[in-house]
Amino acid sequence: MRSLVKGPRTAARAREDSASTNGDDDDRLSNALALELMPAGCSRLATAMVAVVLGCGTQGSAIAGELLRRGFTVRLCDVSESATNLAREKLHQSLLDFRHMGLLGEDEVTSMISRCIACKDLDAAVDDAFTSCPGLLFIEALPDTIETKQAAFAAMASACASKSFDASRVLFFSNTLSVQVADAAARMPPRYAQRTVGVRFLYPCWFIDDLEITASPWPDGLSLVGKVEVESAVSTDMSVLALIAPHPPHAELAARQLLGAAGFHILNYTEELDKKTRLKLTYEDVV
């Protein structure tokens, strides 16, 4: 598993913080470690992007937490308002646990939970979405059945259509391993379907740089083979242009630019490893 990006700026800040923090050695070490773990893209993205996470179980909540850590504003949406509120409470507890372990700083936890919003439904999740951000991401983390995926993507598209959202400012991510992206998007209007990308956040998601993107199924898609890395030093301007340029790039390229700017290490998905083997390797590397 690729280690987190630690540029000279972040390392220097960690050393300065360790030298100047009042308190015992454990506190100084915890603060230094938290800064070392800060992804390179976090400061650049700030709160510029909004991500709607649909499905707040173990995987969805971890994805939401990692996006918060990388600077996104996250809107949670689950099967009911009470389930969504509970998911936010559990996510907050996870942040506090990481703070106790020294993996997050106190200010980070405060900032992250302030950017995590529990929404009663998808309509509420997209309400006023573009008042403070250039683009909107939808990420589904639902049971891996074609019926569930199709219903979810149709609902996401309907929520966008109800607000007359320009498709070039929206991206839809599916976290599936077994359902083809084109099949999942089959019930979406074409303008939204072509903004759908297969993106897998590798278990356990927290503090993991690697993610997989499926080669696009759409006719004008990219043909990428093997491992693809996006420079983590991509500027904020590029991540914004990926969504709002007059002629925005294909959805897959936009996803690569945006996630690369957030400090992720992007791999092109292949079916060489089955799901069990992939998760086993990921788990062993993390532990």
Image (tube, grey):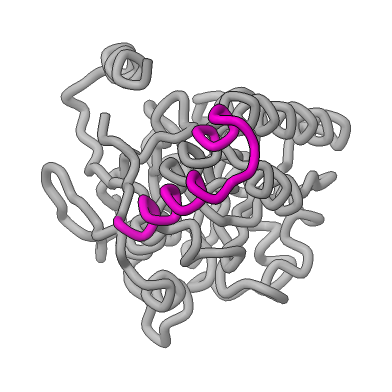
The residue closer to the viewer here, 181 or 34, is: 34
**Farthest left residue in view:** 225
**Farthest right residue in view:** 82
Q: Which residues are magenta?
A: 8-30
The residue closer to the viewer here, 192 or 53, is: 53
Query: What residue appears at the point 30 percent right and 57 percent down from the top-left corner?
Result: 8
| x then y, percent, for residue 31 | 54, 40
Report whether residue 96 is seen. Answer: yes
Is 69 situated above or below 132?
above
> Is 76 placed left or right of 233 in the picture?
right
Dominant SS type (magenta): helix
Is 177 situated above or below 213?
above
| x then y, percent, for residue 117 | 77, 49
> Is 93 placed left or right of 52 in the picture?
right
Query: What residue appears at the point 70 percent right and 30 percent down from the top-left corner?
Result: 96
The residue closer to the viewer here, 127 or 133, is: 133
Q: Say which quadrant the C terminus sits in.
A: top left
The residue closer to the viewer here, 132 or 207, is: 207
Q: Is residue 91 magenta?
A: no
Query: What residue appears at the point 49 percent right and 57 percent down from the top-left corner?
Result: 42
Is 69 situated above or below 85?
below
Q: Is residue 20 magenta?
A: yes
| x then y, percent, for residue 189 | 54, 60
Query: What residue appears at the point 64 percent right and 26 percent down from the top-left corner?
Result: 100
Report whether residue 186 is seen. Answer: no
Give the total of numbered labels. Answer: 0
